[in-house]
Amino acid sequence: MKQYLVLSEEVRTAQEQGKPVVALESTIISHGMPYPKNVETAREVEQVIRDHGAVPATIAIMDGSIKIGLSDAELEDFGQGTGIAKVSRRDLPYIVATGKKGATTVAATMICSELAGIRTFVTGGIGGVHRGAETTMDISADLEELARTNVAVVCAGAKSILDLGLTMEYLETKGVPVIGYETDVLPAFYTRISPFPVNFRADAAETVASTLKMKWDLGLSGGAVIANPIPKAQAMPEAEISAVINQALEEAQTNGIAGKDVTPFLLSKVKELTGGKSLDANIALVKHNAHVGAGIAVKLAEME
């Protein structure tokens, strides 16, 4: 095992015994939700994965190491921490080399998952092509990572603050399959639907797992998006969330917010404008993704 990778006891034992492991990111804890809701949610999501037959591995950078699986104390530390770096592909070497604390984004979590031999990763939503990217060139590194790293990402589609049509076009260019889990269209994070069809529909974890295994057996590098809609009970009306997002985007532009500050600002503004309903939706969809992701990891483990 590479010296900078530190596996928790639970993850190490699972891998030695051939049990399925599911990766989780840490940005959702440090930058995605307020304390103590973030830590509470992280623990609940880990438990959902255990309850469905797999082992959770929350990934973060600490003390010059990539931690694959966090203790309760480390989760708490990340939940309350300030000045924790948001780590993507470009940031990973510097944050590890300097011993700083870093929370992994989708892209960085995929890299660390592959290094640790984990093929299934659960998150809320992927990044994508930002609105207006034809002039700003603001495109999330998540998409490029999906094109090159052999990890499946189970998510509630792409965040609806993005340009979903251009995001799907980018993924198509890079040969990344978007598999709808019990859906024919791309879910848009807070809502179950969007105008954009997925590439394939799968109604069972086994179908997803066999597709992933075949992809990698054929030597086709890169990941896949498993788009799993938010549960109906927590989904938000499309017209309501669209109006809120448009208002948040206008405020971001007025305030000159750009680059990687855009997403945290927009999500915080959406939470404020929806009276907290968006946070409840976020929590519900991550737990649902954990349930589906654990099922896929179990089937993949059976096939390997």
Image (spheres, grey):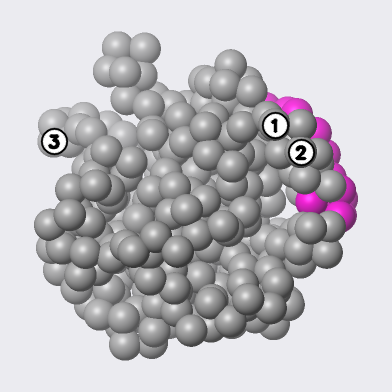
Of marks 2 and 3, the one in the foreground = 2
Amino acid type of the residue tagged 1 in the rendering: Gly
301 or 186: which is nearer to us? Answer: 301
Residue 86's x, y, as percent?
25, 52
In front here: 226 or 162?
Answer: 226
The reply to whether discs 2 and 1 touch (Cβ–Cβ < 8 Å) is yes
> How crowded is the residue under tag 2: few (<14 C-alpha within 10 Å), some, or many (20+)?
few
Query: In this view, which residue lies farthest toward the bottom?
Result: 73
Residue 98 colored magenta?
A: no
Q: Secondary structure at mark 2?
A: helix
- Disc number lying in front (3 or 1): 1
Locate residue 195: give its quadrant. top right
Question: Circle 3 is placed at which residue position?
Answer: 255
The image quadrant where one finds the N terminus is: bottom left
Give the left or right position of residue 226, taking residue 295 as reference: left
Mark number, residue 219: 1
Identified by mark 3, the residue type is Asn
Residue 165 visible, this orientation: no
Q: Position of residue 168 (x, y in %)?
A: 59, 25
Asked if one can make out residue 38 in the rendered structure from this viewpoint, the answer is yes
Span shown in magenta: 192-209
Q: State the residue in front, 57 or 204.
A: 57
Separation of residues labelled 2 and 1 (CA atoms) = 5 Å
Q: Is residue 201 magenta?
A: yes
Q: How many marks?
A: 3
User: Label 1 neighbourhood size at 10 Å, few (<14), some (14-19), many (20+)?
Assistant: few
Which of the two discs, 2 and 3, labels the residue nearer the N terminus?
2
The residue tagged 2 is 217
Q: Secondary structure at mark 1?
A: loop
Q: Residue at x 22, y 56 (%)?
A: 96
Asked if 293 appears above or below 250 in the picture, the reply is: below
The residue drawn where x is 28% and y is 65% is 65
